[in-house]
Image (spheres, coloured by chain):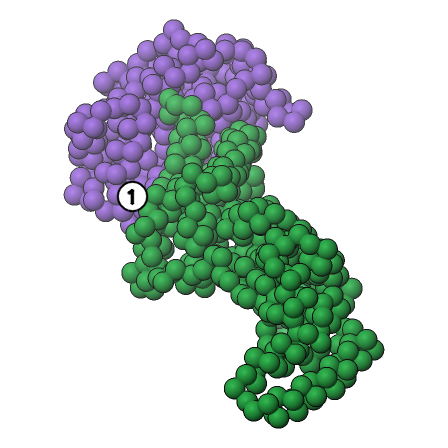
Chain colours: A purple, B green
Amino acid sequence: MIEIKNLRKSYNGHEALKGISFAIQKGEFYGLLGPNGAGKTTTISIMSSILKPDSGEVIIDGMNLDTHPGQAKQLIGVVPQEIALYGDLTASENLHFWGGLYGVSNSELKKRSEEVLHLFGFYDRRNDNVKTYSGGMKRRINIAAALLHQPKILFMDEPTVGIDPQSRNLIFEVIEKLHKEGMTIVYTTHYMEEAERFCDRIGIIDNGQIIAEGTLKELKSNSALKEVVVVTYDHANESQLKEISAKWPDSNLSENKISFYATDVQSALSGIISGSGQMGADISNIEIQRTNLETIFLSLTGKQLRD
Amino acid sequence: MIRLALKDLKLFLKDRRSMLMTFAIPIALISLFAFAFGGVGKGNEETKISMQISDLDNTTLSKDAVNIFTTLKNVDAKVVPIESAQDAIKKGKESNVLVIHKGFADSLSDGGELPLELQYDEAKEIEVGLLQQSLIPKVATIPFSLGNPKAMMASRFEKMTENSSPELKENIQHQSDNLFESLSKGIAENSTTQDPSSAFFGNEVKMTKLVAAKKDNGLGLIQAVAGTAVMMLLFSVVGIGMSLLEEKQEGTLKRLLYAPMNPLKILFGKMISANIISIIQLIVMFLFAALVFGLEINNHVTGLLLTIIATAFACSAFGVFLASFAKTRQQVQGLSTLIILVMSAIGGSMIPIFFMPSLMQKAAVLSVNYWSIQGFFDILWRNLSIFSTTFLSRILVLVLIGVILNSLAVFMFKRNILKMS
């Protein structure tokens, strides 16, 4: 559905994109993650055709974005990070305006507006000016405005920044519904739990390059990271603990705690418990530190995602 | 408290816009108004009043009189055929013409009334008033310098005493001869001194309003409505243009760019809305003036609408251009205040342009205000046809200003706004 081929873009001598390439399948939920300044916004801007690359190309549903921008844009809905709405217009007026830009007829707009107003739960307040809405409601309308023309592809740039849990849950429900209906979604976020929850595949971008790509499982297995089982012992002397630690190929003893590193925690856990029992050491606590996107991201980029 | 005050002063000194608004703009405007009202260069570069002279008598004596009039202090006199002179007045290009009618030489010889007529545009009555102050005393000296003053005085006294007794007539004639000798001597000694004969014999120049006020439209009313309307329109279109920068700041401009349309349509949309609002604003202003102050517009609807549309086009282009030229709202506010006040001052929105020095009058053509106000005067005061070249030339200039500013706005929009978004 989307093909990105060797995109390059420089600003004032700084190379923001260093020839990135990736492809997104139809109906796929693709997460684009990266620290600030990594090149996410530049990539999304080029994919949305508001920025021209220095070289490379973007193919949307078989159409080159550079040669067919109008037709390609018709297929895309963009949810910008900022709340880009007219505060002095009502929700209905905003939806009609933004939908109208995509050539949706008035009768269709009326029907679609009502649908999305119900979907996002503000039908009763459709005639209130947007500036009177809460931050969460504004976020919801911000998303709704990108759906009026029923795009095949949806670019969502940090759509849940700074909102209340209730609005976030509602947005999650809508996103899942859109995904189930077959919409191709490109999603950028700073929230790892969102990426883990929704994304079929994830691309991690840093310094203008895609440094890792795949499903969460693939990213985990491709990373050199192991999961950690931290066991705390009671009534065990130092020699016992040293012996337990020495039997495990990759472990670390610290006071009365041993950290066991393993690629498969489930199978490792029984060995750790039985081994400890054989040595007569009493276990008081077991903590499992799993490999997640946060740790993978940290190991790949050396930065926290929110840096 | 002092710390707080010092902090505010420090912030103020660092804020270039505040410095501009507090010092630079007032200084610029004071200089402009001082220059406009003649406060600068007083005594060195006094404003000369233009006077056309049409010599219909075309005799040696009338030509001599023309030569005398061309030496008038503070008057820039030029000889022009009567038709051209009257046309220039009707079109608002000149304020007056001194007509030396046929029989001028005969009257000088006979001592009769001099057939001199000053035809003028009532819209420029103040300017003509200033001209009269120089002209009338000089006219009064003409019989003494060119004609037969003795015969003139005898003729006047004859008229004054035609019903008196012969003795009284003889006595007055005697006194007249004595008075003539005194006057001649006085004129010979100091020709620039105002001659007492002007007071004695009255005004020798017939005053005729070539372009006169209609019953229902006052000159001041047109000046007030047209001048204010254009100035206020410029301020309001800047606000419309500024919404472009607001869209950029709010992120809606970027969202508009995501839509499948040519980005220039965003700018064209602004231009259209600015034009519509401008047209409505001007119509409302003129309707208000018509309803409340009795400005007569019923007989000038087509011309008025043409001028309104052309003015709205030029002014809205100015607003959109300024918004696309500037990079921030603060820049637009600072620039627009300065430019609009300067254009309004030199263009005749604040003061009629004939008050200004000739240099300023020439500079007036650089402002939208000038062309627009003159267009309104053409229609509402001079009663020109909408097909007259004078009126059409003003409309054409306004349209050209609009086209040029809109073209520049397109260029700057691509360069500034789209990149910034």
Residue B220, picture quadrant: bottom left
The structure residue drawn at horizontal position 39% and vertical position 60%, both measured from the top left corner, is: B214
Give how far across and how far down residue B152 sits, in percent. Answer: 66, 74
* Residue B269 to residue B71: above or below: above
Residue B299, visible in the rendered structure: yes
Front-most of A111 and B81?
Answer: B81
Q: Residue at x 62, y 76 (%)?
A: B155
B344 with respect to B182 (left or right): left
Residue B224 coordinates in the image, percent (x, y) = 45, 61
Q: Residue at x 56, y 39 (%)?
A: B325
Of residues A262 and A258, the one drawn nearer to the viewer in this rendering: A262
Note whether B413 is above or below A249 in the view shown.
below
Residue drawn where x is 57% and y is 27% of the image: A302
- Give the chain of mark 1: A
Give the residue at mark 1.
A89
Vertical placement of B111 versus A168: above or below?
below
Across and down, in percent, residue B333 comes to 53, 51
Q: Is residue B131 left or right of residue A160?
A: right
